[in-house]
Amino acid sequence: MATTNRRLRCAILGTSGYTGAELVRILARHPGAEIAVLTADRSAGQPVERVFPHLGGLGLPDMIAIEDVEWPGLDIDLVFCALPHGTTQEVVAGLLHRTGHDLVDEMLREDRGDLASGVPGAVKVIDLSADFRLADVDAYKQWYGHEHRAPGLQAEAVYGLTELERERVAGARLVANPGCYPTAAVLPLVPLIERGLIVADDIIIDAKSGVSGAGRAAKEASLFAEVSEGIHPYGIASHRHAPEIEQTLSRAAGRAVTVNFTPHLMPMNRGILSTTYVRLDEGRDATHLRATLLERYENEPFVRIFPDGQVPATRFVRGSNDCIINVFDDRITGRAIIVSAIDNLVKGAAGQAVQNMNVMYGLSETAGLGHVPLFP
């Protein structure tokens, strides 16, 4: 685990999206980090408050194009990539190549060992796209429609669901931040599968997301008139978060696991609500499941198991890095219903990325993430 006595200098690539803006919001008040570089190609040359007025008055650098960033002279510790899917692999490969060990070797050859032990060799990356989440590059090709463009880096990427991979995250150079749907679904399921309390081959995940999960780019399906006063499923039997969920559950089960997963778009800005239907191992009920989750997450600062009978809702996590969970007996004998909720832009994206940063650099895991949920 890397530790530091100075504030970490961070770069955010892709600032003009919702996730990039949320990273700025969190890092701007982080006691152990500072924002040194912001990129946003379409908004290059503009101050952040021109695109996001709510981020004004924070003393932030202007946004620039990625190709205009002069990495060697910037003394950057960590890069957050909040770029669109399919574009990050080559960017990260080039970034780690230029700011990593090749540059250190070059500096050593020039007898600059004092500098070579500094930031260039220590640059780390947290990628918030899906480009490094699937460990199997063939599965990536199947679900994303093109070859993985950095298979060598994929081999060292750590899937950064912090509560489940904390030790590996601590030693990682490249962390693949999990998707929002997988975070909400997997946190309650993994401990139950590991204990053999539920049947891993009979899991149905019904998940609902706010419109910010679709990104900030103009899309017909995200127009107000298309989204308001209704709800609709999408990506039926084909959503790209399905293999990500299955990858994590398969590791927990020690064998291949396939799930039924259907996402829905809700007329709200933020939040994910995941309602999961499971078949119980013989002799088990919701009480056993809830007790296991209470034990597993007792010391986790961002996972809360609700009191018996209390129902999680997205309005209880808005703006926070929390994941709230509860378990209920189904009226069908031998089955249970698990309900979990997160803010898709925080625990489902930027907040979990900052949580991973804290772990990677030996900071307090809750640093910068003490936001109490906004209500109402």
Image: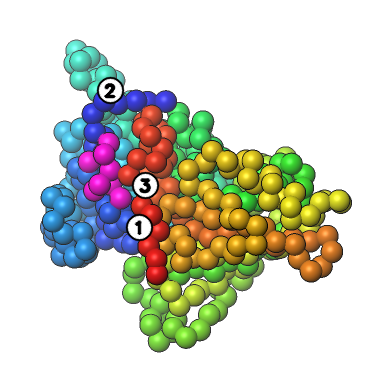
Type of the residue with mark 1: Thr
Of 55 and 36, the residue lying toward us: 55
Counting residues from the start of the chain, the first of labels 3 and 1 encountered is: 1
Instruction: Write the start and end of the magenta stretch as one range.
Output: 26-34
Distance from disc 3 to disc 1, alpha carbons, whole Å, reads 15 Å
Q: Magenta segment: does it hold 295? A: no
Distance from disc 1 to disc 2, alpha carbons, whole Å, reads 32 Å
**x then y, percent, for residue 141:** 55, 53
Type of the residue with mark 3: Leu
In which quadrant of the rendered image does the C terminus lie? bottom left
The number of discs equals 3
Q: Determine the secondary structure under disc 2.
A: helix
Q: Determine the secondary structure under disc 3.
A: loop
Residue of label 2 = 104
The image quarter containing residue 71 is top left
**x then y, percent, for residue 304:** 54, 50
Residue of label 1 = 19
View extreme (right): residue: 282
